[in-house]
Image (spheres, helix red, strand yellow):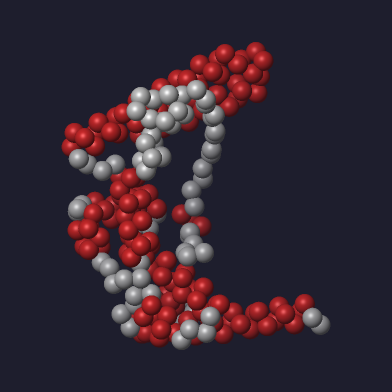
Amino acid sequence: MLHGEEPEQVRQIRSYSVALTGVQVEGLPPNCLIAAGEYPVVSCGQLAAQVGETMRLLYLLSADTDNLGAVCSSLAEAMLNLTDALLCSRVQQRENDGSQIPSVLAHRVRRFLDSHHREPITLRMVAEQLRVSEYYLAHVFKQEFGVPPMQYVMKRRIGEAQGILMHTETPIAEIADTLGFSSICHFNAMFKKYTGTPPGRFRQSFRQSMTHTEENKNP
């Protein structure tokens, strides 16, 4: 794992799945609602609560398809039409003002951070690269992922450092340099801040626990 999620940041998600066939949108392959490479998550905005209730109703009615199959089909078709309308609205908004939908921008930022997390990057550098303001970038990223962009980078670096410490003999100074820390002192301070223990002690504790486990397996 490159980094973990804090327990208070884990979202409670209810998921429903509806399978549809025979869908044909002009200009797209059969059974596709979006073009290849388009962001596949559609934000319902102010309709989110109503959409959730409709999906729940569809789920409940589907338990009796013999008697309510036609109703289920109508609801599924209505959800399909709504999804198509939301997708068209998204495209139109992008064409009209060139703005980026917050969730789409947040995932673009994360992909950029994932690709450059070992480099000495700053929020300003990311904002300039993606051509948005620092404030807006930080706002939409935290809203989507629960942490500020630079904290996300740090947590990823620390998570990666934990893996290297556990499974290799790489010197701590080399790990710090590889992961983009300005110095070994900075690495030590950040590692202790996020894990509660310095990297050297973390490695030692892990090895002791592994030795103890092996001894218990082979008394």
Name the residue: 29% across, 29% down.
89
Question: In the rendered view, would you say 214 is above or below 115?
Answer: below
Question: In the rendered view, would you say 137 is above or below 120?
Answer: above
Query: Is residue 53 in sight in this rendering?
Result: no
Name the residue: 38% across, 58% down.
147
Q: Position of residue 108 (x, y in %)?
A: 32, 51
Name the residue: 31% across, 28% down.
88
Query: Is residue 174 in sight in this rendering?
Result: yes
Question: In the rendered view, would you say 40 is above or below 76?
Answer: below
Q: Quadrant of residue 155?
A: bottom left
Towards the viewer: 135 or 69: 69
In which quadrant will I find the C terminus? bottom right
Q: Position of residue 185 (x, y in %)?
A: 36, 85
Question: In the rendered view, would you say 132 is above or below 67?
Answer: below
Q: Position of residue 70 (x, y in %)?
A: 57, 13
How many numbered circles are shown?
0
Q: Residue most toward the right?
A: 219
Q: Position of residue 13 (x, y in %)?
A: 51, 42
Q: Is residue 84 left or right of residue 216?
A: left
Name the residue: 59% across, 79% down.
206
Q: Is residue 105 left or right of residue 74?
A: left
Q: Is residue 36 left or right of residue 165?
A: left
